[in-house]
Image (cartoon, grey):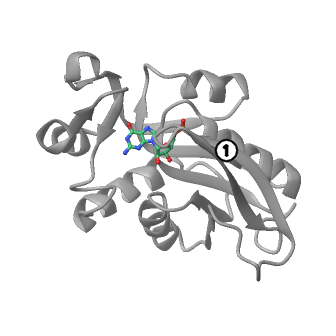
Amino acid sequence: MDLLKERIIQDGKCYQGGILKVDSFINHQMDPNLMMELAKEFVKLFSDLNINKIITIEASGIAPAILVGYIMQLPVVFIKKKQPKTMENMLTSVVHSFTKDRDYTVCISSDFLTEKDHVLFIDDFLANGNASMGVIDLCKQAGSKIEAMGFIIEKAFQNGGKTLRANGIRYEALATVKSLDNCKIVLE
Ligand code: 5GP
């Protein structure tokens, strides 16, 4: 998606360890006009699917997911990174965080993810696919079907894409980073 690629080149910053910082328009300060365009693009890409629910993971997936849900008029559920004492019928999975380099337990209530659900998962980044594998695990526990996954940015030099393809998951990314070598952003 050209609009996104231009913005990444203009405002993205490269950090040691293959991290792309986009916190001036996606991860901290957010550009709602860009976010809406991203959501419209996701809706277009997945228009052939029969889905009844959008799922995402906090925090940075929530903004694009809720806009996709708004356009498609579908409910949006976010997977939580902290387990609330009050959550009923909790399903959990352990995920390794690429940016924080630690494991954490994510959770969702099976009240909101059931065997009746055909879901579209939306997130900001696909890196090694650890968050996505956690989502696959939670959906398996709930008996719901993942119809597709949509990421704002895929880093193709990491293994997430390969992992998702190996698991038979259809996914789309709106921009793909080929390399961040020598702190230079190279897009596909
Ligand atoms: P994965 O689970 O695919 O390894 O990593 C995806 C998650 O890690 C995303 O939800 C995102 O929050 C974070 N992440 C991975 N790589 C980057 C990156 O280069 N920049 C930023 N800002 N977040 C990233």
Percent across and percent down for residue 144 are 81, 55
Q: Nearer the viewer, residue 174 or 18?
A: 18
Image height of 50 relative to 188, above or below:
below
Q: In this view, does 113 lie to the left or right of 23?
A: right
Q: Which of 131 and 147 is in front in this view?
A: 131
Image height of 117 relative to 75, above or below:
above
What residue is drawn where x is 51% and y is 37%? 98
Q: In which quarter of the image is residue 128?
A: top right
Q: Nearer the viewer, residue 44 or 152?
A: 152
Percent across and percent down for residue 24 are 21, 55
Percent across and percent down for residue 62 are 48, 65
Image height of 128 relative to 78, above or below:
above
Identify the element where label 1 is drawn.
strand
The amino acid at mark 1 is Val
What residue is drawn where x is 67% and y is 34%? 169
Q: In this view, does 154 lie to the left or right of 166?
A: left
**Quarter of the image containing the C terminus?**
top left
What residue is drawn where x is 76% and y is 83%? 86
Q: Is mark 1 within 8 Å of ligand 1?
A: yes
What residue is drawn where x is 83% and y is 78%? 88
Q: Name the residue under label 1.
A: 95
Image height of 112 relative to 49, above or below:
below
**Quarter of the image containing the N terminus?**
top left
